[in-house]
Image: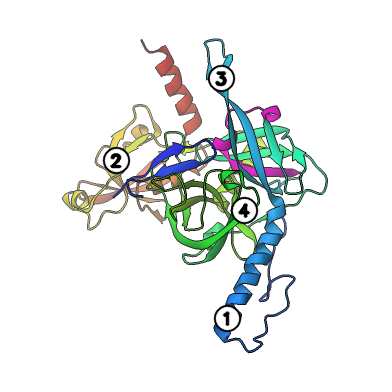
């Protein structure tokens, strides 16, 4: 399996490989604002292509007003007193939506676009030329989702769709500001779902991407991926490429994950991520599965258990394979991370575990990843 590594290229988070909620907008069978295409002597195929072109145009016309470009000035280096010694400017894309399950308007973007920037260091450029500054910048490094609170009159809004209903082969449009060219639109299909086996740096831990071949380039980070109903089904975040430009392999954060994260950010200012305290094998191969008595490489193999962690207290061990969380079969290590991360802290969870050539039941209590990470940072700081 070829692993992809994560590199930030200023305006876009790029994956470099060794090769290379208001009412939803619904379009009827004919494109919005267009008359039904008539054949006029054209073949059925040409008429179908014309109707598809009209559909693309209608979706772009509806969504583009809500797509914004973002510029952020961020601190890079601080001294022992916390004083900024240097700043860097970053740019990306965002999309205006109604606040999740509450009043107000927000801009959704990637955390890496605005991370570390104060509200007065972020500029939001609207399609109609207006400029806004957010009243608050909220971000979650674990999922690379950020929410900017904004105030304004007659702000255009896009709507979220259900990313769980997205299908491989489905047409999509990607909207953003590649290379600073705002209000750009590209098209493609959904190439794959549930992509998580990519290396995206140490901070992004929850990975469950929609893969698309719609062209996404530096500056497009944070822009929406929309279906042909004009609904946001993903937020564009990374690409796989040798050159740093589009190579037809792009990744978007599913809209349902974005909504869950945004709701917590707006409610509490932070996102609570569950954890068990496991070191997992990222390359669980068939040969290893067979040696453990499993018929195939399915589940998440444990390489180590952190001391005093929820996993240790539950009795999990190295070489255990987690096959199931509650009633959900575990596909791989990344799938297990995502399942546990989205569970409430303190919840009891039933695991089906493969140990010594048989399945056993284990019950664990989901811990708080944020508290664990803070504790580890404290230990690292105080270590000689």
Instruction: Classify mark 4: residues with Cα within 10 Å, few (<14), some (14-19) or many (20+).
Output: some
Q: For residue 163, which quarter of the picture?
A: bottom right
Q: Secondary structure at mark 4?
A: strand
Is 331 colored magenta in this rendering? Answer: no
The residue drawn where x is 40% and y is 18% is: 380
| Label 1 close to label 4 by CB (< 8 Å) | no
Q: Residue, x 46% and y 42% (percent of image)?
A: 14
- What segment carries the magenta color? 104-121
**Which secondary structure lies at badge 3?**
strand
Look at the image and tell me in which quarter the C terminus lies.
top left
Sequence-first tag of 2 and 4: 4
User: Label 2: few (<14), some or many (≥20) within 10 Å?
Assistant: many
Lateral position of residue 362 relative to residue 73, left or right: left
Q: Which mark is residue 86?
A: 3
Look at 61% across and 49% down and name the residue there.
Answer: 176
Tell me the residue that label 1 is attached to: 46
Q: Nearer the viewer, residue 205 or 184?
A: 184
């Amino acid at each position: 399996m070829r692993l992809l590594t994560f590199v930030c290229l200023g305006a876009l988070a790029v994956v470099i490989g060794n090769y290379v909620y208001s009412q939803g907008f619904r379009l009827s069978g004919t494109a919005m604002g267009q008359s039904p295409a008539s054949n006029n002597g054209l073949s059925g195929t040409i008429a179908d292509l014309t109707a598809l072109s009209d559909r693309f145009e209608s979706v772009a016309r509806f969504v583009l007003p809500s797509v914004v470009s973002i510029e952020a000035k961020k601190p890079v280096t601080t001294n022992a007193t916390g004083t900024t010694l240097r700043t860097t400017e970053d740019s990306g894309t965002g999309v205006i939506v109604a606040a999740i399950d509450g009043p107000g308007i927000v801009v959704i973007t990637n955390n890496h676009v605005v991370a570390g920037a104060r509200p007065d260091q972020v500029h939001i450029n609207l399609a109609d030329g207006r400029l806004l500054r957010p009243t608050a910048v909220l971000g979650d490094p674990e999922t690379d989702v950020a929410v900017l609170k904004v105030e304004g009159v007659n702000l255009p809004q896009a709507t979220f769709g259900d990313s769980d209903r997205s299908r491989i082969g489905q047409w999509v449009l990607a909207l953003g500001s590649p290379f600073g060219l705002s209000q750009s639109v590209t098209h493609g299909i959904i190439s794959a779902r549930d992509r998580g086996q990519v290396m995206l740096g140490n901070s992004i831990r929850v990975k469950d991407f929609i893969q698309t071949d719609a062209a996404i380039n530096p500056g497009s980070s944070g822009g929406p991926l929309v279906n042909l109903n004009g609904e946001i089904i993903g937020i564009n975040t990374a690409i796989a490429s040798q050159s740093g430009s589009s190579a037809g392999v792009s990744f978007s954060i599913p809209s349902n994950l974005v909504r869950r994260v945004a709701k917590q950010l707006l409610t509490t200012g932070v996102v609570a991520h569950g954890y068990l305290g496991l070191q997992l094998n990222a390359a669980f191969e068939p040969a290893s599965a067979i040696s453990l008595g499993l018929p195939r490489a399915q589940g998440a193999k444990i390489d180590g258990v952190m001391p005093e962690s929820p996993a240790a207290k539950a009795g999990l061990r190295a070489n255990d394979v987690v096959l199931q969380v509650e009633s959900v079969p575990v596909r791989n290590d990344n799938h297990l991370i995502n399942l546990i991360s989205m569970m409430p802290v303190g919840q009891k969870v039933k695991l089906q575990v493969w140990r010594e050539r048989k399945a056993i039941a284990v019950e664990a209590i989901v811990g708080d990843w944020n508290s664990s990470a803070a504790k580890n940072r404290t230990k690292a700081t105080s270590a000689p």
